[in-house]
């Protein structure tokens, strides 16, 4: 069977990477030896320091003006930019809190130019550089969609134990903290586990869309990443199925320009420990970085330990006019999943784990090689990738109605290919490409007989019984796209895009088809989808510091393999239709003076044919397309420098999310259906788990005595929301306060601490209601203290060829 070849496929993923990258590197070096390099680019490298103290400055953006070429400085202030076009260029360095520095240079083909820049202290905001909006590096100011940026420096300063600890700072983004690093996400949509979002690592989907996992961020090494970009609203025209509510792109860190190594050790309450190790160097045309994350926690909930190991290796190379970014990422997660509590348990004993038998193990491995060459006005890009995912679990949420164990796997090969051409008239840019993904997978589910004991009905043991699902399924997609940008005037920038997605599932069951009961099984089948997704956007520069933007975007999501082939009690799931979304958005962004930057956006999204997991009158689950929902809101983000070394980062979002017309097809009497539920109609109701407002305020004080450290207080608010689609129950919302502190003892030694939920507030990360279990609450963590130390070694900059 398919699942017996997992180790072989994992070995193949690594073998592909280990064989392909050296071969490409050798071919490039041979090209240089033969003298057939076009010698059309060069290298800029150097060091950025503080003008007053000459101390090195980390995480400074250094870029070549008028080009997409840029780099971040390492902890020792060094940077390295490859593939810089020959001729006269201007190198610019900018970062928050310091004035920009520029220097003119002349690039010689095949040569290296050294540039050392010193930045004067100044409380001034800068415009972030982003890549997710168009798959090309650009200034945030010229984007026609809303993209929030959380840079790597802020991730490392925050040192969040869970993704919610930093991602919730983005306007309109809410990450719920579930067991371990498990999470659910809301972004212009309700808090849910639905496949509404696309998670990327360096622009490559971390999973095939047909095998979506709402916990996808625990398969990525977020604490050691180079930053996160959050593109809100449909991204289908560039990224394909699943990119309905938004796209989360986690960026890996490049190799340091000079030899360096860092180790961060931290501990906290409830047995929390984490070790983060990173190091690397650049020598000649090759750079290497390796990261390792080892995390352990006993958890504040009973019998719910969590453990993870994550590693990332990135190899950057440049030769013969080509640049290569080779990345291997691996993660292993082991945790106990804790089910939600009823109201009495939530108030009296929030640490209770009613299902210590529930478990989850997840293993993810990814490898990719991004190859690019720029020849004059044309850029060619090819990124082959491979990935492997396996998850084994006993779903805690199913224990009351469908207790099972799962074993689900998928193993992918794919390629992202594109060409970009710039034209002088109207600064026009044309990008055309194709994404291809081939992912065989499997799913195995056994029924289990569980034993509940005690007054709280704790599930403490189980016996595995017969298989209820056992199938192989192959997801395949081919998706050509085209993207055009042009400037009819100096102040006006337009973009248009179109993408076609051609998707097929080839499904083969290893159990006999079953047409009755709560676990029906479809016969072998091939299911195909074809969809075209357009987009259009505009940005107008009102003044050099103020821009207005807007977009019209259409997106879609094909049903996942689980929705199609895990039929449950539905009469038919093979005829599920894709979810569609139409989005309209306008916004304004810019600077007010040198000390304040803002971004405000208003949007309206309509989802059609959304797939609802419907709870029937007999407490079974049925997946069904079900009408329209409307999602409208306003989002505001502000960064401002205040007097006396103070800075404030604030975000606010208000939304209205309603069922416009919502009558599940499962509620329509049909052959094999359940006529007892035919009266269900949610039209006009509030969508459940959709907070009315979200807010976050981070106040930072950075006095000179902390030598680059800071003290920070953070207030995070989640508004009220309906707990069920009938709007019988409502959760009132909550607000919590967190504190952060760090000090640089020496340039290579940092001490830090943080305290979450300072007021020890009792609140729910997630609240839901249904007629069978009534109120169900996932409690938030109590007051928790963490502390640690970071030590670094930074050598001298390596030489070049």
Image (spheres, grey):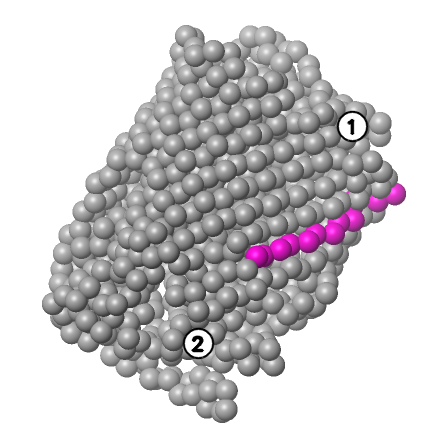
Q: Farthest residue to the front: give it.
A: 684
Give the mark nearer the N terminus: 2 vs 1. 1
Q: Is residue 739 above or below residue 749?
A: below
- The image quarter containing residue 524 is bottom left
Locate the C terminus and report the quarter of the image it occupies. top right
Q: Secondary structure at mark 1?
A: loop
Q: Is residue 668 found left or right of 18 in the rendered image? A: left
Locate the N terminus and report the quarter of the image it occupies. bottom left
The residue identified by callout 2 is 774
Query: What are the residue bounds of the magenta stretch?
Result: 705-719
Residue at image point 55% right, 39% down = 148
Foreground pick, 308 / 604: 604
Numbered badge on residue 122: 1
Q: Residue 556: image x %, image y %?
A: 31, 43
Q: Residues within 10 Å of mark 2 (few under 14, many from 20)?
A: few
Count of labels in the image = 2
Q: Residue 538: image x %, image y %?
A: 45, 24
Q: Farthest residue to the right: give it.
A: 705
Q: Is residue 561 found left or right of 792 in the rendered image? A: left
Q: Residue 185: image x %, image y %?
A: 48, 54
Magenta run includes residue 707:
yes
Numbered badge on residue 763: none
Q: Secondary structure at mark 2?
A: strand
Residue at image point 42% right, 21% down = 494
Q: Is residue 689 found left or right of 171 in the rendered image? A: left
Q: Residue 632: image x %, image y %?
A: 45, 45
Residue at image point 84% right, 30% down = 53
Please identify, in this view, whether the residue under mark 2 or under mark 1 is nearer the observer.
2
């Amino acid at each position: 069977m398919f699942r017996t070849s997992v180790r072989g496929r994992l070995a193949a993923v690594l073998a592909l990477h280990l064989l392909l990258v050296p071969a490409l590197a050798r071919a490039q070096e041979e090209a240089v030896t033969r003298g057939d390099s076009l010698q059309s680019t060069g290298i800029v490298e150097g060091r950025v320091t503080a003008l007053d103290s000459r101390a090195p400055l980390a995480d400074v953006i250094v870029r070549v003006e008028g080009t997409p070429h840029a780099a971040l400085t390492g902890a020792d202030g060094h940077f390295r930019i490859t593939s810089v076009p020959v001729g006269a260029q201007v190198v610019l360095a900018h970062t928050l809190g310091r004035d920009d520095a520029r220097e003119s240079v002349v690039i010689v083909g095949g040569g290296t130019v050294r540039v050392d820049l010193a930045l004067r202290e100044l409380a001034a905001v800068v415009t972030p550089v982003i890549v997710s909006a168009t798959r090309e590096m650009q200034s945030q100011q010229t984007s026609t969609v809303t993209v929030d940026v959380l840079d790597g420096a802020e991730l490392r300063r925050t040192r969040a134990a869970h993704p919610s600890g930093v991602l919730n700072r983005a306007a309109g983004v809410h990450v719920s903290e579930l067991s371990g690093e498990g999470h659910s996400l809301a972004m212009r949509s309700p808090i849910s586990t639905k496949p509404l979002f696309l998670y990327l690592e360096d622009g490559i989907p971390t999973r095939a869309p047909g095998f979506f996992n709402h916990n996808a961020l625990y398969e990525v090494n977020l604490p050691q990443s180079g930053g996160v970009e959050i593109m809100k609203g449909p991204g289908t025209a560039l990224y394909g199925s699943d990119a309905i509510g938004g796209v989360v792109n986690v960026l890996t860190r490049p190799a340091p320009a000079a030899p360096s190594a860092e180790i961060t050790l931290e501990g906290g309450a409830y047995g929390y420990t984490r070790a983060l190790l990173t190091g690397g160097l650049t020598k000649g045309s090759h750079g290497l970085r390796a990261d390792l994350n080892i995390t352990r926690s006993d958890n504040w909930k009973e019998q719910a330990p969590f453990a993870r190991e994550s590693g990332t290796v990135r190899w950057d190379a440049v030769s013969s006019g080509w640049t290569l970014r080779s990345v291997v990422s691996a993660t292993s997660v082991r945790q106990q999943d804790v089910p939600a509590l009823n109201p009495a348990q939530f108030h009296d004993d929030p640490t209770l784990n009613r299902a210590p038998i529930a478990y989850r193990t997840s293993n993810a491995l990814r490898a990719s090689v991004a190859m690019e060459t720029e020849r004059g006005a044309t850029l060619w890009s090819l990124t082959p990738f491979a990935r492997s995912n396996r998850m084994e679990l006993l779903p805690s949420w199913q224990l009351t109605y469908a207790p099972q164990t799962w074993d689900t796997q998928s193993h992918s090969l794919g390629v992202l290919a594109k060409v970009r051409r710039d034209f002088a008239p109207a600064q026009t840019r044309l990008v055309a490409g194709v994404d291809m993904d081939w992912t065989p997978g499997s799913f195995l589910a056994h029924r289990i007989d569980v034993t509940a004991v005690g007054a709280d009905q704790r599930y403490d043991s189980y016996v595995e019984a017969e298989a209820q699902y056992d199938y192989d399924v192959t997801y395949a997609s081919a998706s050509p796209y085209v993207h055009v940008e042009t400037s009819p005037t100096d102040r006006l920038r337009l973009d248009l895009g179109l993408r076609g997605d051609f998707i097929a599932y080839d499904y083969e069951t290893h159990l006999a088809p079953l047409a009755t009961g709560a676990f029906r099984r479809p016969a072998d089948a091939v299911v195909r989808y074809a969809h075209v997704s357009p987009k259009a956007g505009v940005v107008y520069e009102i003044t050099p510091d103020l821009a207005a933007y807007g977009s019209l975007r259409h997106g879609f999501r094909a049903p996942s393999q689980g929705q199609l082939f895990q039929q449950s009690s539905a009469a038919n799931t093979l005829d599920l239709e894709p979810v569609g979304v139409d989005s309209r958005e306008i916004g304004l962004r810019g600077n007010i003076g040198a000390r304040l930057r803002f971004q405000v956006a208003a949007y309206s999204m309509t989802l059609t044919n959304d797939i609802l997991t419907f709870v029937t009158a007999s407490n079974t689950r049925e997946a069904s397309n079900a009408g329209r929902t409307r999602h409208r809101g306003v989002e505001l983000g502000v960064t401002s420098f205040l007097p006396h070394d103070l800075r404030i980062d604030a975000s606010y979002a208000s939304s209205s999310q309603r069922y416009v017309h919502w009558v599940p097809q499962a509620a329509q009497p049909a052959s094999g259906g359940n006529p007892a539920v035919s009266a269900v109609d949610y039209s006009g109701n509030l969508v459940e788990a959709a907070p009315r407002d979200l807010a976050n305020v981070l106040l930072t004080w950075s006095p000179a005595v902390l030598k680059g450290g800071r003290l920070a207080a953070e207030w995070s608010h989640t508004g009220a929301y309906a707990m069920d689609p009938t709007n019988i129950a409502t959760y009132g919302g909550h607000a919590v306060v967190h504190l952060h502190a760090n000090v640089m003892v020496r340039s290579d030694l940092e001490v830090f601490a943080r305290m979450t939920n300072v007021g020890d507030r009792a609140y729910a990360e997630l609240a839901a209601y249904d007629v069978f279990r009534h109120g169900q609450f996932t409690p938030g963590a109590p007051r928790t203290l963490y502390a640690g130390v970071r030590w670094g070694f930074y050598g001298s900059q390596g030489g070049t060829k």
